Image (cartoon, rainbow, N blue to C red):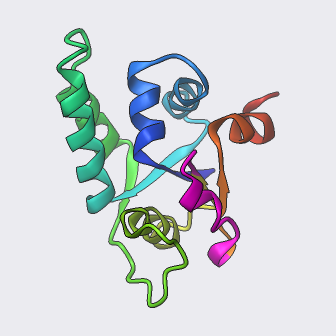
Amino acid sequence: MKVVLDTNVLVSGIFYSGPPSEILRAWEQRKLRLVLTLPVFEEYKDVAVRLGVHFPAINIDRLMDLIIVESDLCSPVTLARPECTDPKDVKFLAAAIAGNAGVIISGDKHLLKVSGYHGISVLTPRVFIERFLND
């Protein structure tokens, strides 16, 4: 299954335990495939590097290299009329459409409101786990 993670889900999964870290474990186990675009990746890296100074045991550069290698990197599509009210979130919709991801995993209220746009479900980490990862 192809998914797009919003930045908060990714960095929460890296630095803390809980549903986002379960999602990253599922990715490591190849139960799902991450889809991203360069603008999404650049935001991941920027935020992870800033937070990483508080977690010196985590090698952020190595993790970012792994994300690039083990994800589907797509060219973003341009959305003529993006439905999302927060312009900073449009890149996640563009990545999902470009990479044919069926799900965006996010807790962002602006993204959650556009669930169904172009057939893409936007689910919180907990709901995603309940629907797709609980055996």
**In magenta stretch: residue 114:** yes
- On the picture, is 115 further left or further right than 59? right
- On the picture, is 33 further left or further right than 88? right
Q: Position of residue 31 (x, y in %)?
A: 61, 36
Residue 21 higher or lower than 36, as above or below: above
**In magenta stretch: residue 123:** no
What range of the chain is rendered magenta? 105-118
Task: State the image quarter where residue 121 is shown.
Answer: bottom right
Q: Position of residue 20 (x, y in %)?
A: 54, 30
Q: Position of residue 49 (x, y in %)?
A: 19, 32
Residue 54 higher or lower than 69, as above or below: above
Q: Position of residue 61 (x, y in %)?
A: 18, 30
Give the residue at x 40% y 25%. Answer: 14
Give the residue at x 25% y 27%. Answer: 51
Question: In the current view of this chain or complex, which residue is farthest to the top?
Answer: 57
Residue 118 higher or lower than 72, as above or below: below
Give the residue at x 65% y 43%. Answer: 124
